Amino acid sequence: MQDDRYRKCMELVEEDKSVVAAASRVPYYPLAVKRGRGAEVEDMDGNRYIDFLSSAAALNTGHCHPRVVEAVKEQAEELLLYTAVYMYHEPLVRLSRRLCSVTPGDFRKRVIYGLSGSDANDGMIKLARWYTGRSKIIAFQRSYHGTTYGAMTLSALSLNMRRRMGPMLPEVYHFPSPDPYRTPVPMSEEEAARYHIGRLEEAFANYIPPEEVAAVIVEPIQGDAGLVIPPQGFLQRLRELCDEHGILFVSEEVQQGFGRTGRWFGIEHFDVVPDAVILGKSIASGMPLSAIVARAEIMEQWQPPAHCFTCAGHPVGCRAALATLDVIEEEGLVERSERLGARAMQELGNMQEEFELIGDVRGRGLSIGVDLVKNRATRERNTEAAAKICYWAWQNGLILSFFSGSVLRIQPPLVIAERELDTGLRIIRSAIEAYLRDEIPDSVLETVKGW
């Protein structure tokens, strides 16, 4: 691509290719970010964009929120790190109390920390096996939990995560998760819930002894599968099934937590209280931090060094997380997410009525997926359309990505202004119109790989 608007960006991209492993990249377009404020990003060439990605849903409070930046600065001047493995520091204790108070469940809790959602998923596997004395873990097809070995084993979304990297961890079993838009045969949401719970019940009756299952680890809304929202009855019956067999029910909230869905946590849409939650991404507004929050009795006797990391729960990350919680509460971001999400869903619903290309619009709060199809009857995914639309949007001032091959990912910062949200939606409309007029060249597909 020869375009003087992106000269500095392109130079950095070429340098990046010469020194950074390609395995760490899922590229969409050559955007080299220089700075961000709120819901706006500026690249190295001075081009500005509305951000509908929030750094993969890690920036619910927006880019460089002043409260978070100030907390980071104050803490960095006082203490960058003294490992909490051996010593103690106040920000970690304060944050732990806050996390215990905002996560679901009116019971005593304990917290343990890491640096990413991936390591938190690994930690949950270890904790569940240790606490129950059982070996088996239940996860779901098309789930994504991360790329450390435990998280990668739980995930079932990409062959490139597994090809030539086995063996995976033993005794992790995957079951289909209901997708109301793409059911095995035509069925209602209630029928889909019963059908998928039935697959698990059959396994318990025939080849997986339920008394050997330690935990069910589930995304309440499957994020990278395309923001798939299961029927209400599915998670409720899954919780009942866990209770019947003494199995831990774990809600993986790395992508959908901290107000993203118009609730503090995604599981709260389903009237289900988990035994543990897995946290990451937006917990510290961009600082590396993760956590597991679980019933106290599950974690109290867990022996060190079962889940120790030198930098886990570092003071700067904890201060950033405390400021993040303050911002979410004081600026009403949970309620704001619900309100602006409804505004976006209405406009996207209007587009769905207008454009046959849009097969489905689904979401909760500001976590919305727009599923693009080649044919509404067959619901075949339209990856080319998703790639071209995202590229055109970038060239016209909107950071937009897609996942699951065909689903536009709309997850802006929860602080986004209404005018910014409306402008971003207008850009999406214009991008769709440009695609339908065949104005976006096939050459962009050489750049856009997507997730």
Image (cartoon, helix red, strand yellow):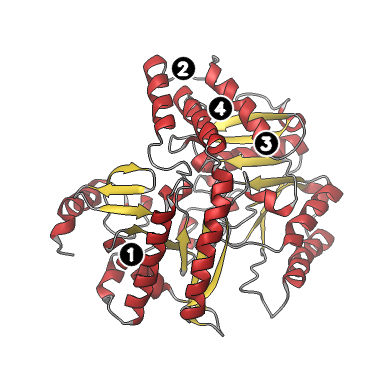
Please indicate whether residue 16 sits to the left or right of residue 214 in the image.
Answer: left
Tag of residue 308:
4
Number of numbered discs visible in the structure rendering: 4
Q: Nearer the viewer, mark 1 or mark 3?
A: 1
Q: Which residue is mark 3?
A: 127
Task: Tell me which numbered mark, 2 or 1, is placed earlier along the sequence.
Answer: 2
Question: Which element is circle 4 on?
Answer: loop
Residue 77 position within the rendered picture, expressed as x and y whole percent measured from the top left: 37, 17
Task: Tell me which numbered mark, 1 or 3, is placed earlier along the sequence.
Answer: 3
Dividing the image into 4 quarters, which one contains the N terminus? bottom left
The span from disc 4 to disc 3 (Cα, nearest Å) is 12 Å
Q: Which residue is mark 1?
A: 393
The span from disc 4 to disc 2 (Cα, nearest Å) is 13 Å
State if disc 4 and disc 1 touch (CB < 8 Å).
Answer: no
For badge 4, the amino acid type reads Cys
10 Å crowding of disc 3: few (<14), some (14-19), many (20+): many
Q: Which residue is mark 2?
A: 82
State if disc 1 and disc 2 touch (CB < 8 Å).
Answer: no
For badge 3, the amino acid type reads Leu
Seen in the picture, residue 126 relative to 387 is either above or below; the reply is above
Q: Nearer the viewer, mark 3 or mark 2?
A: 2
Residue 432 position within the rendered picture, expressed as x and y whole percent measured from the top left: 38, 74
Dividing the image into 4 quarters, which one contains the C terminus? bottom left
10 Å crowding of disc 2: few (<14), some (14-19), many (20+): some
For badge 1, the amino acid type reads Ala
